[in-house]
Image: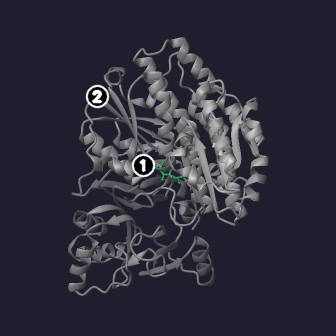
Amino acid sequence: MDGLARLEYRGYDSAGVAVLGDGALRTEKRAGKLANLRQALEEQPISGDGAGIGHTRWATHGAPNDVNAHPHVDNDNRVAVVHNGIIENFAALRLELEEQGCKFASETDTEVAAHLLRTELARHDGLASAMRAVCRRLEGAFTLVATSVDDPGLVVAARRNSPLVVGRGEGENFLASDVAAFIAHTREAVELGQDQVVELRADSVTVTDYDGDPVDVREYHVDWDASAAEKGGYDYFMLKEIVEQPRAVADTLLGRVSVDGQLTLDEMRLSPEELRSVEKIVIIACGTSYHAGLIAKYAIEHWCRIPCEVEVASEFRYRDPILDQQTLVIAISQSGESMDTLMAVRYAREQRARVLAICNVNGSTIPRESDGVLYTHAGPEVGVAATKTFLTQLAACYLVGLYLAQVRGQKFGDEINAVIAQLATMPDQVERVLDTVEPVRELARSLADADTVLFLGRHVGYPVAMEGALKLKELAYMHAEAFAAGELKHGPIALIEDGLPVVVVVPSPRGRSVLHDKIVSNIQEVRARGARTIVIAEEGDESVRPYADVLIQIPAVPTLLQPIVSTIPTQVFACELALAKGNDVDQPRNLAKSVTVE
Ligand code: M6R
């Protein structure tokens, strides 16, 4: 149950467990959060001395109710299965199984796996062999974990396009979608590859492919411990993760410069020759990671003069993008498991583009399937809303931009070092913003009844505005939308009405002054039409003060790096407003932390 609690952020609409013992299989499942299952088990405990499996669900097929919750069992109650992903050919398989006499209890795609496993068990020697046979029949994405009364000390799991990791302990072993589930027991993990089956006993771990042939696996040590995945005295993980941002950014920047002053990205795996041949960059990502990509474009094009496109991963492969060996695709994903991004990565590699992943989770699928990787070091992020991982993605993107400029000779060493020195001050600047955000909390509480909040930005402030709007939608369930401030007069200004809160992210007046002046005009335009202006601007920028109903000041930093500080008030704003509405900011409705289905 504690392991499930650590995984609850991945899905929290229902949960269940199955345990084996005394020749029987006992299951308990409940709709709603894990607390409901916990209570049910307290009232009516189930026990067993064999293996156990459990699941927290994010519904795809079938409503989130008790019956559709996992585990699912076969008609003889001998096999139990939990599943992440989508079995795309489940309708045909269900029909076939029903014709053979199977009775289905749920509306899920998962249940076909339970019945199929039971059928294959009758034909094969053992659960692992049956699992391989089942996997060969399934289409789509799945991690399946199964137990059977025939072998109570065994858990068998298989994966295709969905995460699964093994934890190796002393006389005990674990399986989970994420190391967080077993980090309290062991930090030694084994990465499972695509289309592999693992047989797990207390004292052994055997991995094969779907044909039963043994495969090599990568073992690794997890560099954070259980306390990193605890709330540490905060009411919500999100509050803790916002506060952890200075450390997260500092850790991501740590150790990137060699003794001779060269930027070195050790895990990069792409050679300087390969990077010198790059003619175009395409960044693919989803949600918050996409916003990091939008910001990266400004920095990369400015520093490296390489054309850079940014695209939502779910759209990318459906538009026949032009890619070749000279294209560098940068896939940004904190989890490394977003299915949309993973599919885009695979597509890009099929087109012979080189793929560099920016990722926060060691051993996850996207970096494993990419040509190179740059890990962010944010530590585990449990709150569904991305906060510290976003800031670390920005830091990583800046490092990639500078590294490209270095290997391609587009900037002198001292110019690169100057930016690195500026980057190195960012953790302190983030700390300063965090020290001054109390008024943002008050403001957020005062706006708890607002219906809509608009966000405006220009240049790198535009993606920051988009990120602010996403946070508000995701956490406070309210309408929020971001516009490039220059687009206002092309339509959106019609939305402005008396008292409408409009958050404006103002570029530094020390950057391109024309940009700054233009946004000051935009602020006046919306204010003249009744908007309540909430202005995020650099300390010392007095020109915006007369037009700001609320002024939020952030430290003066170089223009391209400003998103690292300007994002923080928008995170705090969304979090506090959602809390004022009584929402659970760690587990907002309808969402899951990593979206492992398309
Ligand atoms: O794990 P990823 O970075 O690939 O996730 C992408 C999005 O699902 C994610 O950023 C999502 O938008 C966040 N919940 C937003 O806070």
Name the amino acid type tagged 1: Val
Q: Residue at x 27, y 36 (%)?
A: 323
Q: Residue at x 60, y 77 (%)?
A: 36
Mark 2 — residue?
Answer: 326
As drawn, the label of residue 190 is 1
Q: Check disc 1: other Cα within 10 Å, few if <14, some if 14-19, many if 20+.
A: many
Question: Which image quarter holds the N terminus?
Answer: bottom right
Image x and y of residue 402, in percent: 49, 23
Q: Nearer the viewer, mark 1 or mark 2?
A: 2
Question: Can you see residue 196?
Answer: yes
Residue 497 figure quarter: bottom right
Q: Is mark 1 within 8 Å of ligand 1?
A: no
The residues bearing labels 1 and 2 have C-alpha atoms spaced at a distance of 34 Å
Question: Which image quarter holds the C terminus?
Answer: bottom left
SS for tag 2? Answer: loop
Name the amino acid type tagged 2: Gln
Labels 1 & 2 near each other (Cβ < 8 A): no
As drawn, the label of residue 108 is none
Q: Left of 540 or right of it: where is 259?
A: left
| Mark count | 2
In the rendered view, tell whether residue 414 sits above or below residue 19.
above
In the rendered view, tell whether residue 273 sits above or below residue 69.
above
What colour scheme governs how the chains and residues are painted in the rendered image of this protein? one colour
Question: Can you see residue 377?
Answer: no
SS for tag 1? Answer: strand
Counting residues from the N terminus, which is met first, the one under dot 1 or under dot 2? Answer: 1
211 and 112: which one is in front? 112
Image x and y of residue 109, in percent: 34, 73
In the rendered view, tell whether residue 78 sits above or below residue 51.
below
Q: Residue at x 56, y 38 (%)?
A: 392
Residue 522 figure quarter: top right
Q: Residue at x 31, y 87 (%)?
A: 103
